[in-house]
Amino acid sequence: MSEATKSPTVDAWWMRLLTTVGVPLLSVALAMAIGSVIIVFSGHDPIAAFSALLQGAFGGWRQIGETIMRATPLMLTGLAVGFGFRANLFNIGAEGQLILGSLGAAWLGLLLAPLPPILSIPLILIGAALFGAAWAFIPALLKAKVGAHEVITTMMFSWMALYLTSWIVSGPLADKGGIPQTPMLSGAVWLPTFDTIIPGLPPMRAHLGFLLALLVAVGVSLVLRRTTLGYEVRAVGFNPSAAQNGGISIPLTTIYALCISGALAGLAGASEVLGVTHRFFDQVSAGSGFGFTGIAVALLGKKNPVGILFAALLFGALSAGGGTMQLEADVSQKIITIVQGLIIFFVGAETIVTWFIKRRKRLALEREGATNA
Amino acid sequence: MPVLELREITKVFPGVIANDRVSLALERGEIVALLGENGAGKSTLMNVAYGLLSDDGGEILVDGKPVRIRSPRDAIALGIGMVHQHFMLVAPLTVTENIILGHEPARLGIIDRPKARARVVEISAQYGLKVDPDAVVGGLSVGMQQRVEILKALYQGARILILDEPTAVLSPQEVRELFGVIRSLVTAGLSVVLITHKLDEVMGAADRVVVMRDGKVVGETTPSQTDQIGLARMMVGRDVVLSVEKGESHAGEPRLTITDLQVPGERGLEALKGVSLTVRSGEIVGIAGVDGNGQTELVEAIVGLRRPSGGSIDLKGRDITHAAPRETIHAGVSHVPEDRHRRGLVLEFDLAENLVLGDHRDAPYASHGITDAQAISETARQRIKDYDVRTPSEHVLAGALSGGNQQKLVLARELGREPGVLIAAQPTRGLDVGAIEFVHRRLLAERDSGTAILLVSMELEEVMTLSDRILVMYGGQVVAEFDSADADEERIGYYMTGGKVAGAAPAGAQPAGTPDSAPPAPPMGGAL
Amino acid sequence: MLNGFFTPDLFASAIRMATPLALAAIGGTICERSGVVNIALEGIMLIGAFFGVVVTLATGQVWLGVLAAVLAGVALSGIHAFASVTLRMDQIVSGTALNILALGLTGFLMEVLYGHPGATDSIPHQILPVFNFPAASGTGFFATLWNWINPLLFGYTPIVYLAIIAAVLGQWAMYRTTWGLRLRALGEHPRAADTVGVRVIAGRYVAVLISGALGGLAGANLSLEQVGSFSENMSAGRGFIALAANIFGRWTPVGSYLASLLFGFAQALQIKMQAYQDVLHIPVQFFLMLPYVLTVVVLAGFMGRAVGPAEVGKPYEKE
């Protein structure tokens, strides 16, 4: 009896530890394990695959740079999706807002190139964020006004974003030469890579966008913790009825939250365009996937900015190492997508742990009951 | 031989022993009242008997034979039926569909609808429980829904009927009618367990009383061997003052004036059809009424959670008819919501964050959109002290507090803001005696300091104890007004069930259809 | 200039295009009626389409391919059921994970099995229409009438008819059978169902698995009847459009089917309009956007007026 009454508190501390750090780590490990099994079944060597992956992600400065480069947009989309989560909004369409942000960055980059970079780059970033926010605005408005579920609407807006930008880069903003893309941006608006700033580093693709992402993470953290807007977003996310009773407008907060989420996704797009691609390509045949991976990042990062940083680095590494893995171990990069889905699943299913514990307890009780009878 | 016997039932929830070796026996044709405060473990015990909860020890016997009840299916098969406090009815389904659910007359999985309907009509006639078998349950009155619940248990062949707080939502007349029904069921051979915390019901209706406190049975008696004071002492474990001292009111100028207020409700019906009332400073105006007669809509319209379609709400000369919650808070209206978990608190917020909800944008808690954690914590500590919220610190999550402390937290926030008008809806719902006393004293102190208070409560006793004036709501209208001095329960009850014309009601008048077998109305002395 | 635009083919094409949406929407309806949101329908459709092609290519039997598609859908929905019903996981998160998993798995296996990304090989024989009546010649009234009736009623492949049957049968079962009554109770008030002995967990599992079977069948229709091969991400948001159709259809099977017809018509229209591009001078991308725009417009106009099952999306916990 006394044992039974005490056990919940005992559960409590290690459960807490388990869910904050343990569950994410466990999820990654489990997903990797299943990934390995799939690799084995496809007739390849998982050890070779993972060592190639590690080599590709951390094998040297250039590879680490690649990992950071890939992690940069993921941090921003992770923050975007995570911010939505705080208001209990599932921005499954961050991809679309990212695409619009990319296009906005490419367009503004062409337009503002003559300005000094100190002016043009911030303006482009702000502009791209606004593009992303604008693409989230209609789903936000529909959610706030008629309750249309953002999972469906933002998803539809992602598909629209693909086709809309596809038209723009093959029409109004098309480059010469028939490839659906915008003209190359002038070097003046590029985000410099780290090797051009820090002497001694080998050439790498990691760029200042990473610092931008870190700053944004700090900013998001401050907004959530230290501002009335953050307070209201959290209140609405936790309990909209109580928030409303406390004088908080649910529609307005919903609109703010989803638009801020969209703005962050837009920034991710801008960071890619200014830092990596330096132009906008037609995405219809192969979307960036950053928006969807952002969902995994946000969930794995437990919706908090520090966690999101680490989660983004992990997925950045997977993505950077994926190419090497495909080349050297002949294992398709698509395995990364599988692992990503599995990670979302396992992190989301942290109840799996509690479920197993309950099951064990119940079985124990039943055994006990059986022996008593 | 008892039809149902529970032996040494133990049920443990994380951190609480809800039932500690509880035993209870029910004889055939008997009404046993299971009496106890909120949280005493009454419902838990009966949920174990009904198979909704699994026990952690003990034995259940039906007709003297040990049985295992693992699910409601088992309980139903053994002839046990239960009417839950929160009705287990599926709103969009019809009466017949609700009654047959789980035990459908069917061939090859296809429901025999004429047969189902006929059966419902038959049982309803047999026990004199009239219902429309084709009505959609969501549109029925609360009393009618309860009837459907009882019919459902009878349809399933219940010989043992467990009623969990069946009178919580009924008017005194409906209560009497219900007890008439219960009597006739018992006469027909059923046995009834009546879960309640209301002393007068026990005295009026039960053959035998089992009293529970803190998960244990603390006594057993019959109504003839005791009185309400004695029962209250058993139930609470100490002497209880059954009513709070209330001084003379010194009502001043009108603070809240509502004129001809109309509010749309669900499905295009009007929830409020022209309500007018005035609350003056230094008085408590109580609203009595059966749940669902427009009280919730009235409160929500005043605080800005619902949009009126006509009429006006005036706060000391300022029109707040269409004001949003934020504006009404600023205008000096505080609100203790009827459901503190849903409306009152953000359970995932800590106490400090909860204590500024509504003022979180204002000085000193925030300026230019930046919150001041220091100022919030200081105020929080002060309020926690003033309102005796038992907590190790202001950074504990609100969800970790007990119900009583949560309600104190809500009061601390709403009263701490020093409002001109307080709207208190169901301020003691689900609280234990100590917490109820605390809330009542605070409300009276607030009145004496000059606040205008509108009190809405389903507990008629509470309304009568605290109010200086009493309004009765029925069907979205105020149908009667009483001065607390000459209010009596019988006349209020008459209006609660739809006595139409405001004016002189015949004293002791009964609504039509009350069975003659109804026992005389017991005094409502000790509803706790 | 739009001569020959509104032909029988346009409407027949609408019904064809509506089929995968309708099957998934009916699945979504059944699933949501039980209280579980299934946004994994997108991935279920995808994986169904894929395994349909794989098994058809491996065995040469297209019907085995259809069976495989259904089983693949059931398998994936089984994971969703376990996650959302047993583990009480957030149903949207589970669905998202499974959608991404399906995308990765089909992409990965495609490369493993066929050695090239993008699309699988084509199946040797696409599923043919059930009936094959000749067109009438001549321009008389009866000839014209027949040339409308024939494609509109008799011009379809089997799964197109199955979708119609699923709608009618589903509607009947939902309102006339024990299963249907219990299903409707599950999503509205699972505890009430539990207290009268209805098995909530089992009931929800069955509903989710049925939605998986229908979603897999929808995938088979896409790959085996409409296209003849599998290409990466070929479900293209249809799972989400189907959920919108379920809402527009007021959570009823027949309603879902009718709503899907609207979206199918939009799809057929946009394909047809592409042929008229030279006349219309509208970039092709705007046609491609049409189904997605329509989905948002329908949701915007219709939400708030439709009320779904009260407890949808909420896991049921007994104690």
Image (cartoon, coloured by chain):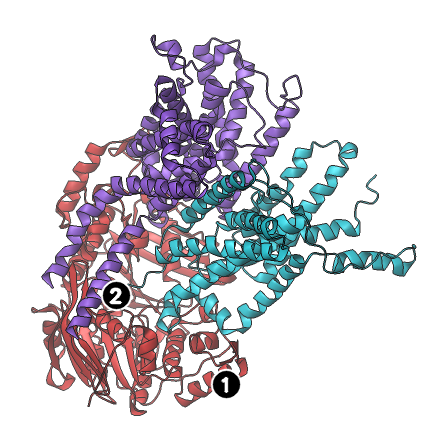
Chain colours: A purple, B red, C cyan
Mark pair 1, 2: CA separation: 43 Å
Q: Is residue B252 left or right of residue B291?
A: left
Q: Say what secondary structure mark 2 lies in.
A: helix
Q: Position of residue C111 (x, y in %)?
A: 53, 38
Name the one closer to the observer, B208 or C262.
Answer: C262
Query: What residue is disc 2 on?
Result: B463
Nearer-the-camera pick, A336 or B41? A336
The quadrant in which residue C82 appears is: bottom left
Residue C266 visible in the snapshot: yes
- Number of the label disc, if any, that sits on residue B392: none
Q: Residue under circle 1? A: B118
Of the residues shown, which amino acid type is indicated by label 1?
Ala
* Residue drawn 75% across the image and 31% down it: C281
Vertical comparison of C96 with A64: above or below:
below
Q: Going by the image, does C272 lie left or right of C211? A: right
In the rendered image, residue B26, in percent from the top left (x then y), is placed at 21, 84
Number of the front mark, 1 or 2: 1
Residue at the image position 71 percent from the left and 44 percent from the top: C269
Residue B395 percent coordinates (x, y): 19, 41
Q: What's the amino acid at mark 2?
A: Val
Q: Who's the residue at 51% across and 21% down the image? A: A105
Is residue B148 shown above or below B316? below
Pick the quarter of the image with the C terminus of chain B.
bottom left
Name which of mark 1 and mark 2 comes first in the sequence.
1
Q: Is B97 displayed left or right of B79 in the figure?
A: right
